[in-house]
Image (spheres, helix red, strand yellow):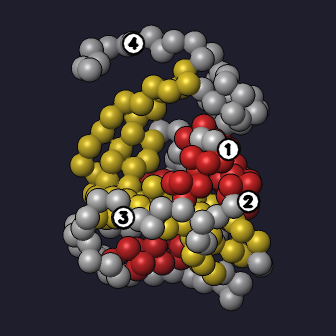
Amino acid sequence: MIIPDGYSDVPSGKTVSIVTHLEMLERPPVRAERSEASWSLSKVDAPDPGWYLALFRRIGEDWLWFSRLQLSDEELRGVLGSPLHETYVFEAQGQGEGLVELDFGVEGECDVSFFGLTPALVGCGAGRWMMNRAIEIAWSRPIRRLSLHTCTLDHPGALGFYVRSGFVPYRRQVEVADDPRATGLLPRTSAPWVPVL
């Protein structure tokens, strides 16, 4: 569908965002980072849905992450338990504070399907440390392309962070979706800077 020039109405109960798709076609130089002795990134095989969704909410509630919340426990187990999907938890002081999901579903490619930190860790250097590990893990496999996407509902610094990490934008889309606050998937107080219509 082609969106006409000018303004287009967004139906009540919907959100709209501009999605930017980015890719990396070769392994970049490692970006300078700071680290803390308590930081770790560990693979979690077939995560328990309850544990996973609690962390997913802590990270994504302010950015209206909702896609995993729409799945049944069985569907979520199927996604997270796939041998082509890898889930990593970032821990600080022994507490889960971040999430990286790598999808190797397309031969020769890896997609960073989720990447995020809880609000307490944003801005302290943990994101750079975590991204360096994610890039290292992805490019340790026989891939030709690493991709991810972000949108205008994400942290304002996300797109710039990904570009500085070595990703290059190649496509832009408009996404219209049910507002997860209107459907009850997320509290109405989530993302207060985005009005519920």
Report x, y in % for residue 15.
Answer: 53, 25
Label 4 sits on a secondary structure element that is loop
Quadrant of the image for the N terminus? top left
Q: Residues within 10 Å of mark 4 (few under 14, many from 20)?
A: few
Q: Are marks 1 and 2 in contact (CB under 8 Å)?
A: no
**Left or right side of 87 for 24:** left
Of callouts 4 and 2, the N-terminal one: 4
The local crowd at label 1, few if under 14, some if 14 to 19, many if 20 or more residues have their Cα within 10 Å, is: many
Q: Which residue is mark 4?
A: 8
From the viewer's perspective, is 166 left or right of 45? left
- C-alpha gap between disc 4 and disc 2: 40 Å
Mark 2 crowdedness (10 Å alpha carbons): few <14, some 14-19, many ≥20: few
Towards the viewer: 91 or 184: 184
Q: What residue appears at the point 65 percent right and 47 percent down from the top-left corner?
A: 73
Number of the front mark, 4 or 3 = 3
Q: Which mark is residue 104?
A: 3
In the displayed structure, would residue 2 be above or below residue 80?
A: above
Residue at x-position 67% and y-position 24%:
183
Which comes sooner in the sequence, label 4 or label 3? 4
Provide the residue designation for mark 1.
61
Q: Determine the secondary structure under disc 2.
A: helix
Q: Which residue is mark 2?
A: 51
Q: Secondary structure at mark 1?
A: helix
